[in-house]
C-alpha cells in the first residue's frame, strides 16, 4: 500500500471526507483530491497522486460517500 493510499484511508477512518477536484489524463493518470473536514466539509488539505493503488481505490467515484 502506498503512502498516499494510507493517508487517504486514515483520513476516512478518522471520519472525514474527500472529494476529487481533478483527474489527469494519461497512464496511469493522476488525481487531485480535496481532504475535507468532518464537521463543516471545508477543505483542510489536498492529495495530489498518481499512485496506481489510489487510482484503483477511488475508481470512478467523485466523493468518499459514493
Image: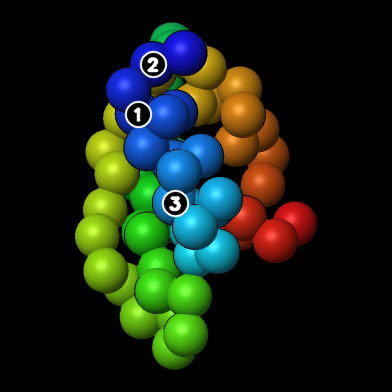
Q: How far across and down, in percent of the image, does residue 13 sit?
A: 56, 50
Judge whether 16 appears above or below 42 on screen: above
- Find residue 2 and name its label: 2
Looking at the image, tell me whether mark 3 or mark 1 is earlier in sequence order: 1
Residue 3 image-quadrant placement = top left
Distance (Cα) linking label 2 and label 1: 5 Å
Q: Is residue 24 visible?
A: no
Query: Badge 2, how many Cα within 10 Å: few under 14, some, many 20+?
Result: few
Q: Position of residue 65 (x, y in %)?
A: 70, 61
For the residue pair 15 and 2, the one nearer the viewer reads as: 15
Q: Secondary structure at mark 2?
A: loop
Quadrant in the picture for the C terminus: bottom right
In the picture of the structure, the residue carrying the numbered disc 3 is 11
Label 1: element kind: helix
- The image shows residue 5, relative to residue 12, as above or below, that is above
The answer to the question of whether label 2 and label 1 lie on touching residues, with beta carbons closer than 8 A, is yes
Q: Which residue is mark 1?
A: 4
Q: Position of residue 22 (x, y in %)?
A: 40, 49
Q: Specify which label sits upstream in the sequence, 2 or 3.
A: 2
**What residue is rendered at 55% in x and 64% in y?**
15
Amino acid at each position: 500500500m502506498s503512502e498516499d493510499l494510507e493517508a487517504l484511508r486514515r483520513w476516512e477512518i478518522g471520519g472525514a471526507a474527500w472529494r476529487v477536484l481533478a483527474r489527469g489524463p494519461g497512464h496511469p493518470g493522476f488525481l487531485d483530491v480535496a481532504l475535507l473536514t468532518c464537521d463543516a466539509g471545508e477543505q483542510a488539505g489536498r492529495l495530489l497522486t498518481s499512485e496506481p493503488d489510489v487510482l484503483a481505490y477511488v475508481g470512478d467515484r467523485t466523493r468518499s460517500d459514493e
